[in-house]
Image: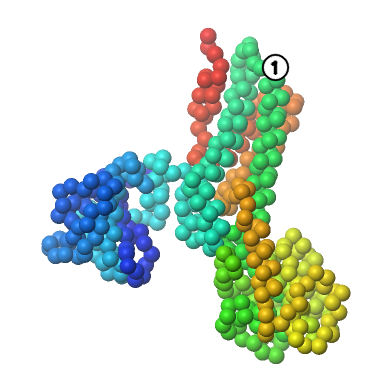
Amino acid sequence: MFDDATIVAIATANGIGSISIVRISGVNALEIAKKISKKNTFQPRLATLSYIYDENNETIDEAIVLYFKAPFSFTGEDVVEFQCHGGVAIANIIVDEVLKYGARLANPGEFSKRAFFNNKIDLTKAEAISKIIEARSADAVKLLARQLKGELTNFVNEIREDLLFMLAYTEVSIDYAEEDLPSDIFDQIENKIQKIILKLSNTLEASRRREGMIEGFKVAIIGKPNVGKSSLLNKLLNYDRAIISDIAGTTRDTIEESVRIGTHIIKIVDTAGIRTASDIIEKIGIEKSIQTINEADIVIALFDNSKICDDEDKKILELINENLNKEIIKVLNKSDLENKFDKSNLMDFIELSTKEDINPLIKKVENFLDSNTHSDEMTLISKRQVTSVEDTLYNINLAKEPLVSGELEFFAHFITEALGNISSITRPYENDEMLDVMFGEFCLGK
């Protein structure tokens, strides 16, 4: 829970801008606003232009003041926002004045925490708010906006209702065996279980496939030394980020940068050339390169058109074959030079020169990103949500056998566990919910 102190914080990012917002929430928010503005009243939800004063009655700024009366605010408490001129100093001065009248600085996430405890948002919306601030693509913003509108909440509530239905009828069968129950009740329960398993499995699959959409898809550039990895990175960034040299092993560590492709912001990682190395530093770099491949969503494997396919190239091909679950884009670089590389080793590759046009590669990456983001499938946006669904699915699968064998106490136990798992995504499950269904559906205690 939280204390009842009035809290204050700057709601806009640090730095210089045209507008900064200072937000106050709590029982004394309105009184503090009146004191530093020298105004007697504020009409809820009406923008009021007002001077802001310090304790010596000296003017700090002229700001727009917005008052949101409880419970009709983001936190469910009285909230006042000061939209002052942007800059490093002004907002901080206003915060200092608010603190003098008894407010305290808000802790990280405390406004959203109060909104949760006051039933203004659930955990899915709180996570969506956090993620949308850091969204790295237009598609991520659209997905998170769907969660803000309650899409995941509705998804969870539908499953909760089905699980509550199963649990309520099971408890009635155990405790009130004389009650007249529908003859096909356990067939109904079994059908619901199969539908839930399918729904949750599809959601997990879609979420894993689109995991990079929230944090930013990671693209690894791999290849043996001197195939043009650093040249490709520099071309994608449109400036010389990586050192280019004919000396093998120049790139000894992974270099990570962000770049926009289409509507997506992606992380591009230029890895150390993969070869057999004697230098201990280079060996560490190569190990990190292999780790990067495992973490990447897309792997761009470069080969040198002007060189014969050797053991180092074959090592790259082996790594590709070990990661067939990823999107692999094979690129035969240096197409402007005489061909010596046996193209039959590659199959399905892009031929280009990083010194010239790399648009075919960019288009290939963009098409993959688009295909993994444009979907109406339910998508989980955090590891916490994924774990909750995995645990729900685990307990529902455990419940199937005792249902078939008639061991209803065990079945009820696993369904209760599943209810707790799925409910943790939005708001914790309470046993009273099941009792409400029981006593609402059945004529008990007659």
Mark 1 — residue? 183
For the question of whether residue 198 can be seen, the reply is yes
Residue density around tag 1, few if under 14, some if 14–19, many if 20 or more, within 10 Å: few
Residue 170 pos. (x, y %) = 63, 23
Residue shown at the point (54%, 27%) measured from the top left: 434
Residue 193 relative to residue 63: left or right: right
Residue shown at the point (21%, 64%) measured from the top left: 61
Image: 145 above or below 278:
above
**Is 37 or 416 nearer to us in this picture?**
37
**Is 65 or 134 nearer to us in this picture?**
65
**Is 87 or 421 nearer to us in this picture?**
87
Residue 197 pos. (x, y %) = 68, 39
Image: 27 above or below 17:
above
Residue 64 pos. (x, y %) = 25, 57
Q: Quadrant of the N terminus?
A: top left
Q: Amino acid at mark 1?
A: Ser
Residue 320 relative to residue 110: left or right: right
Image: 408 above or below 136:
above
Task: Check the image and name the residue furthest to the bottom.
Answer: 246
Q: Quadrant of residue 402?
A: top right
Q: Quadrant of residue 290?
A: bottom right
Q: Secondary structure at mark 1?
A: loop
Residue shown at the point (23%, 46%) measured from the top left: 43
Residue 205 relative to residue 118: left or right: right
For the question of whether residue 297 can be seen, the reply is no
Task: Check the image and name the residue furthest to the left.
Answer: 56
